[in-house]
Image: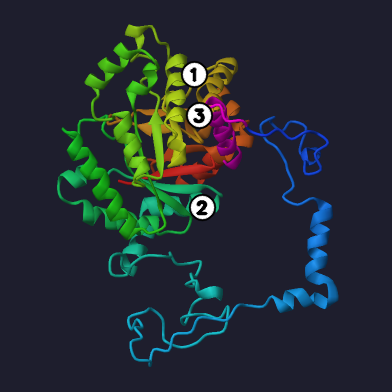
């Protein structure tokens, strides 16, 4: 991330006509020889102090049994006597009012340095006034809670995937959010995705309603589930138009709520920590303007980079196109090509940091769409996905524990062979 920032800064300076000094090979402060041969040219190694200067600095402090270090002891502390006339001292500070040794527990039951102790069998960091112990226990026993436990046991990073938009509209967001917070407090949960298709579906009629929901949901969950990441999923069709103004105008009129500036504001305000962008519309939405799916995808990621959304949040690509009724019918060659275009490309374009693939879902009529064969049987697409071990941590999928393929334990063991992250759906 730091190298990317350095590169962007260097590029910006060059566009502004500001020169960046180049260090020659014989520069005594240069240390490029310590870097790998495939290090990009814009990454430069330079000693803050040469090895010789570092040795001199060390000798200065260590000679004569460290006399200079001892002589440089702490400055005279600033002491305030609260008994003096005119002195004002706070009387409502936290703590027990007693002195403690450095590193000793601040409160009974805490660990080194004052961190609250957290038994591995219990969830941590919840407000007992908001999420009770009974609620935590009840959440752990639900299908979603059991899926969280199984996923964590298989080394997967877990998100709770829920939909709070309807609850918000019905005035029930606070009650539902407490249940979600109890699930999110289970060990192994990194965050909560609180809405999908945000602004793209028909839940909200106006931009004001949409913004009010995002603010309310984020504020409520920050309070109930402190420390957990918050995510949303949507599609922003205008991003795929590239420089075609007619395309942007038409798609903005068609889908006015998921406006790029509005979505970017959610990120800049810190309301959302992860944004997943769906790509299901790439194949059909842009035909009128002669923009194919690959170009639309490329346009989107260029726009995302240009808007620097990744400076505020993690950006993810989401794809439902690998699954089909009964299982993927792609050949090995077709699967490789599709993975290259829709998994590798977003990652290599350096815009999306993770890719979420829908691997299984069941419609209202009970028909199941899968990527693998039935009961996780192998097929060419599943086999090709298994080869992506180098990017496992960047691959995610969704799982509904209410409608398992086999059972929760078997399902999550199979999914963990490909995916490093899991979105556990709630009823």
Identify the magenta region.
1-19
By secondary structure, the bulk of the magenta-drawn segment is best described as: helix
Count up the numbered dots: 3
Residue identifier under label 1: 329
In terms of image quadrants, where is residue 177? bottom left
**Of callouts 1 and 3, the N-terminal one:** 1
Front in this rendered view, residue 207 or 29: 29
Q: Is residue 6 magenta?
A: yes
How crowded pointer 2 is (Cα within 10 Å; few <14, some 14-19, many 20+) is rated as many
Front in this rendered view, residue 366 or 219: 219
Tags 1 and 2 touching, CB below 8 Å: no
Any part of residue 322 in sight:
no
- Residue 413 coordinates in the image, percent (x, y): 54, 44
In terms of image quadrants, where is residue 381? top right
**In screen coordinates, is 225 left or right of 394?**
left
**In screen coordinates, is 175 left or right of 401?**
left
SS label for mark 2: helix
- Residue at the spot 63% in from the left edge and 30% down from the top edge: 387
The label on residue 372 is: 3
SS label for mark 3: loop
Q: Is residue 4 magenta?
A: yes
In terms of image quadrants, where is residue 125? bottom left
- Determine whether 278 is above or below 45 in the image: above
Find the distance from the CA under tag 1 to the CA under tag 3: 9 Å
């Amino acid at each position: 991330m730091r190298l990317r920032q350095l590169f962007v800064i260097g590029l910006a300076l060059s566009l502004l006509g500001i020169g960046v000094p180049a260090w020659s090979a014989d520069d005594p402060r240069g240390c490029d020889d310590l870097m790998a041969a495939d290090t990009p040219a814009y990454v430069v190694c330079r000693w803050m102090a040469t090895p010789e200067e570092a040795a001199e600095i060390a000798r200065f402090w260590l000679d004569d049994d460290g006399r200079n270090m001892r002589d440089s002891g702490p400055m005279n502390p600033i002491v305030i006597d609260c008994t003096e006339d005119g002195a004002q001292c706070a009387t409502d500070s936290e703590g027990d009012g007693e002195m403690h040794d450095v590193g000793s527990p601040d409160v009974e039951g805490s660990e080194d340095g004052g961190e609250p102790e957290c038994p591995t069998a219990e969830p941590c960091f919840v407000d007992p006034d908001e999420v009770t112990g009974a609620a935590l226990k009840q959440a752990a026993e639900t299908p979603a809670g059991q899926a969280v436990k199984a996923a964590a046991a298989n080394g997967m990073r877990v998100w709770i995937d829920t939909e709070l938009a309807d609850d918000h509209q019905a005035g029930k967001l606070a009650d539902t959010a407490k249940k979600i917070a109890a699930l999110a407090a289970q060990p192994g949960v990194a965050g909560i995705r609180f809405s999908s298709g945000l602004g793209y579906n028909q839940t909200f009629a106006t931009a004001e309603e949409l913004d009010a929901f995002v603010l309310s949901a984020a504020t409520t969950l920050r309070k109930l589930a402190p420390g957990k990441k918050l995510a949303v999923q949507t599609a922003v069709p205008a991003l795929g138009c590239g420089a075609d103004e007619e395309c942007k105008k038409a798609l903005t009129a068609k889908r006015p709520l998921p406006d790029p500036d509005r979505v970017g504001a959610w990120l800049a305000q810190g309301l959302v920590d992860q944004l997943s962008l769906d790509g299901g519309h790439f194949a059909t939405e842009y035909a009128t303007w002669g923009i194919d799916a690959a170009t639309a995808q490329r346009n989107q990621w260029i726009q995302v980079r240009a808007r620097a959304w990744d400076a505020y949040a993690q950006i993810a690509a989401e794809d439902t196109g690998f699954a089909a009724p009964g299982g993927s019918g792609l050949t090995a060659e077709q699967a490789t090509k599709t993975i290259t275009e829709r998994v590798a490309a977003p990652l290599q374009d350096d815009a999306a940091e993770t890719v979420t693939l829908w691997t299984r879902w069941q419609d209202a009529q009970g028909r199941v769409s899968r990527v693998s064969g039935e009961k996780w049987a192998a097929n060419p697409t599943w086999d090709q996905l298994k080869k992506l071990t180098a990017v496992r941590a960047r691959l995610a999928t969704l799982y509904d524990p209410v409608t398992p393929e086999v059972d929760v334990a078997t399902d999550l063991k199979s999914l963990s062979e490909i995916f490093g992250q899991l979105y556990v759906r709630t009823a």
